[in-house]
Amino acid sequence: MGLGINGYTSPAARKITGGYDLPEGVDVRGRYDDEFAKILTNDALLFVAELQREFRNHIKYAMECRKEAKMRYNRGGLPGFDPATRYVREGEWTCAAVPPAVADRRVEITGPVERKMIINALNSGAKVFMADFEDALSPSWENLMRGQVNLKDAVDGTISFHDQARNRVYKLNDQTAKLFVRPRGWHLPEAHIFIDGEPATGCLVDFGLYFYHNFAAFRRNQGGGFGPFFYLPKMEHSREARIWNNVFEKAERMAGIERGSIRATVLIETLPAVFQMDEILYELRDHSVGLNCGRWDYIFSYVKTFQAHPDRLLPDRVQVGMSQHFMRSYSDLLIRTCHRRGVHAMGGMAAQIPIRDDPGANEAAMELVKKDKLREVRAGHDGTWSAHPGLIPPIMEVFNNNMGNSPHQIHTMKREDASTITEEDLLQIPRGARTMEGLRLNTRVGIQYLAAWLTGTGSVPLYNLMEDAATAEISRVQNWQWLKYGVELNGDGFGVKVNLDLFGRVVEEEMTRIEKEVGKEKFKKGMYKEASKIFTRQCTTPMLDDFLTLDAYNHIVIHRPKGSSKL
Ligand SMILES: CC(=O)SCCNC(=O)CCNC(=O)[C@H](O)C(C)(C)COP(=O)(O)OP(=O)(O)OC[C@H]1O[C@@H](n2cnc3c(N)ncnc32)[C@H](O)[C@@H]1OP(=O)(O)O
Ligand SMILES: O=CC(=O)O
Ligand SMILES: [Mg+2]
């Protein structure tokens, strides 16, 4: 690896503490493990520390700007296009050419950085695998560090896994999906690594360790001279994209690789970001490979942005689909924006997953997935996401039938018609009814998801749908919103109003139902009671918490030697 060879390490700065070989100013408070030590090398930690030191004030400033924007929206303001950057939106410019290795991205599979799933995903037949440190991962020290070990083995091509129960060995096929890595969002700290007395920024740890250990092998084995490739989540403004661009340039300089080697797809999954799509691409124009419709976080963000707007309440979560006007407008404008700038416009995740024990229900679920994907490809998306290997063949078929041999639709589906989409289109209130079953389902799903997350699992099947941090956020903020404004459940004919008494009863009854469904033993051993407490607090707090996982994170931080786990 170039960094150490270039004289980057300063041996004088070395300090060996608790087994790890630490540079000056860096403290690792997570458990020691020989495997983790191969990732947490002095050089790699110094690289992360350099990123942290250069960008921490920029990140703090960007987070302050988020707070200011929130206050504006809470005072009645609406997000919209920024007049100051009209020249960027109206200017004629394009992003750097798409690297040949990722020209065809028609089906991408996503999943947590778990060893067996990484092998299955890379072997799945998808064009791309997005390995997730974010929505699909509970960011415990074990998960994060094992994830880094797994990715390094995957990029080296040596990864294997022995499933002892089934006596099955997993190895990579000759042909595998191209790897993208999604680090955490800007807001999440990494409480097991302190730099100059402060917790490190989670995404700089994820990015820094992965980049440091893999850039050379990735460019050789996967990227055809480009890479590594990333997905960037939950941004709210182009100033946040500028920080990523600067992080990439610094990493490229330190590694001695060409500017523009690193490429990233940005998820447009917050409401403010839909008004910044050109600006985000512009900031990342040398490092961009497109935008993606992160539909689940986008719905969460709609509620969060309008938390103080009782005239913009959402109907039941199940009714907020891509056919709602504001969702369709967002996807259409994303396609138009990406294709005008010469990059991929990626579709999002259908929540349905294969249902093994009920062929009829399985067929219905597959039909819903195919319908969603048909809408995406016909609208002009160049590819889309799949949550499960079993969904790849039907999704691939839909894209093949509609795209033929072309790797993408960048030049053929310009969607000029979408240039007339207005702020009103993007903000239009979704239609539909609110029901008691909606409240119950939010509660049942939110608690079960959080119970899984607290025990180390970040994506789970619940009631035949994929649930992850983004979908659980919708359940949480929707309950909060309905409670805050005492809304009438107008969809089931009883006209019941949501209040604390009703919600208390719903939580109690849903906990009984969960216990029945999962069984007494699992319920007792699991973290359901803790999850219920956290979820209930977050749904009933007067001021909405920004993220479900920020408070919950304190429950999974384990410092060694034992000390305070609170941030
Ligand atoms: C909003 C967003 O951000 S979406 C992106 C983030 N979310 C995700 O990435 C979700 C990814 N998907 C998953 O985690 C899983 O598919 C779940 C939790 C939804 C369902 O999991 P399960 O019910 O355990 O799946 P199931 O039992 O059907 O798995 C069958 C096989 O497929 C594999 N598999 C399932 N999903 C995936 C995946 N996404 N990637 C790789 N392999 C997978 C399993 O490992 C298993 O392999 P095996 O037969 O070799 O043991
Ligand atoms: O990350 C994807 C989303 O839908 O959220
Ligand atoms: Mg998301």
Image: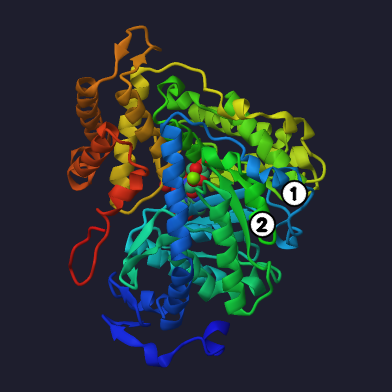
SS class, disc 1:
loop
Q: Is residue 533 left or right of residue 399?
A: left
Mark closer to the chain start, 2 or 1: 2
Measuring 32% from the left and 54% from the top, which residue is drawn there? 456
Picture layout, residue 108 above or below residue 19:
above
Give the labeled residue for mark 2.
Answer: 288
Residue 437 visible from this viewpoint? yes
Q: Secondary structure at mark 2?
A: strand
Q: Are marks 2 and 1 in contact (CB under 8 Å)?
A: yes
Q: In this rendering, would 40 be left or right of 272?
A: left
Q: Nearer the viewer, residue 275 or 502?
A: 275
Q: Quadrant of residue 322?
A: top right
Q: How is the image coloured?
A: rainbow
Mark seen at residue 341? 1
The residue under label 2 is which amino acid type?
A: Ser
User: Which quadrant of the rendered structure holds the C terminus?
Assistant: bottom left
Instruction: Looking at this view, name the residue that lies furthest to the bottom.
Output: 12
